[in-house]
Image (cartoon, rainbow, N blue to C red):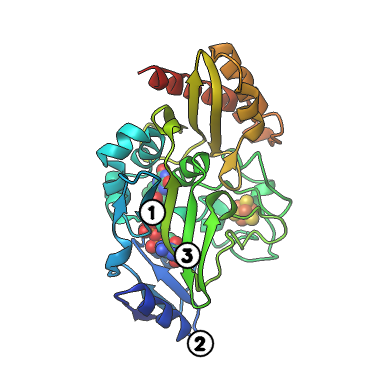
Amino acid sequence: MQNFAYVRPASVTQALEAVAESGAEQPRFLAGGTTLVDLMRLNVLESERLIDITSIGELQTFDTSGASELVFGALSKMSDVAEDPTLRRDYPAIAESLQQAASQQVRNMATLGGNLLQRTRCEYFRGTSYPCNKRSPGSGCAALEGINRGHAIFGYSDACIATYPGDFAVALAAFDAQVDTASPRGLRTIPLINLHRLPGDTPHLETVLDPDELIVRIRVPSTALGRASTYLKIRDRQSYAFAVVSAAVAIFIEDGVVHEAHIALGGVATKPWRATAAERSLVGQPLTWESALRAGAVAFADAWPRKASQFKMALGPKSVAKALMVAKERSAA
Ligand SMILES: Cc1cc2nc3c(=O)[nH]c(=O)nc-3n(C[C@H](O)[C@H](O)[C@H](O)COP(=O)(O)OP(=O)(O)OC[C@H]3O[C@@H](n4cnc5c(N)ncnc54)[C@H](O)[C@@H]3O)c2cc1C
Ligand code: SF4
């Protein structure tokens, strides 16, 4: 057991003061703890100063009724947001991405801010006896020649092929969400799609956030596309499992043709992945099973699977197509 200091601020201001007072101690924010405590117990992550943000009231609320945007405080619980009736009706893709994540018990504890920043489920990252550039920079990547069936087929490097595991961020990517942060240097807004980094030579740096930067809220622009949306998640078992392939799609169909399509992929890339070429391929076309499958094929045209992840090349396009057909049904409703 590593010793650590523990502080419990009651406001964002106090949290930032606690960060600024950390000095040589490495600070980490503690929200629901369902990722962080797990990894500290496994000795994968260390912290010399835990800043427990769960008492910060101003980060606990969310509002899905706004005319221009949906606003989610970083400490909103996954379970509360997943059950929000307005979200379920007007943005089913976002609600479904939360409903299909983890288990009810985890969702009751876990927060939206922590969900965005969850770490990869690569077995070698979580097992400290293996080389892993993400856990221990420069040590190598055991997954390159090891078990990599679930690993990324987009956006990887020779240093790391781990998949970004979350569902919610994939749905947010489809809706052009933004993330507001606060740090001792001030406030900033980051487009969700730019929050996570590609691994490159520095896979241990997973996001563009600084260590002392706190996510305060997530904002999603209101859009009529929301109602005709879905999150389709393919996994090895029906519940309590991470995505092998997932697709968040939202469409706007008028006069029998697609005017706008948003498609984001999960379970296949090192970060939430937007399939813009596939989106463009649908615009101006009637949406049929055939055109949906073609869009799925376009979405995976640049993928680069390894032998064990080759199956995702068949599963991926069909998942996108199936999600598009569900969105089409919802667009007619
Ligand atoms: C068994 C199991 C199954 C799971 N299955 C799924 C699944 O299918 N799909 C899925 O999407 N997720 C899944 N998860 C992941 C789970 O959703 C995340 O662990 C959870 O959302 C993290 O939220 P938290 O509040 O507990 O974060 P914490 O564990 O408290 O924090 C996670 C990380 O985020 C940082 N952090 C937290 N809040 C902030 C903030 N506001 N600003 C800056 N940094 C912050 C922490 O310092 C830490 O590094 C699963 C988890 C478990 C344990
Ligand atoms: S894929 Fe990434 S997380 Fe997994 S062992 Fe390689 S470097 Fe580590």
What residue did someone put label 1 on? 112
Query: Which residue is drawn at the image coordinates 55% and 36% (left, top)?
Result: 265
Q: CA distance from mark 3 to mark 1?
A: 13 Å
Check disc 1 and give the amino acid type: Leu
Whether residue 209 is situated above or below residue 326 in the rendered picture: below
In the image, which disc is placed on residue 23? 2
Residue closest to the eye, 291 or 119: 291
Q: Mark 3 or mark 2: name the one nearer the start of the chain.
A: 2
Q: Which mark is residue 181?
A: 3
* Mark identifier at residue 162: none
Please determine whether, in this image, residue 225 is positioned above or below residue 325. below
Q: Is residue 131 visible?
A: no
- For this view, does 249 lie left or right of residue 38? right
Viewer-nearest residue: 68 or 49 = 68
Q: Along the line of sight, which residue is nearer the eye, 5 or 215?
A: 215
Q: Residue at x 57, y 49 (%)?
A: 193
* Local crowd size for mark 3, using a 10 Å CA cut-off: few (<14), some (14–19), many (≥20): some
Quarter holding ligand 2: bottom right
Front residue of 117/44: it is: 117
Q: Secondary structure at mark 1?
A: helix
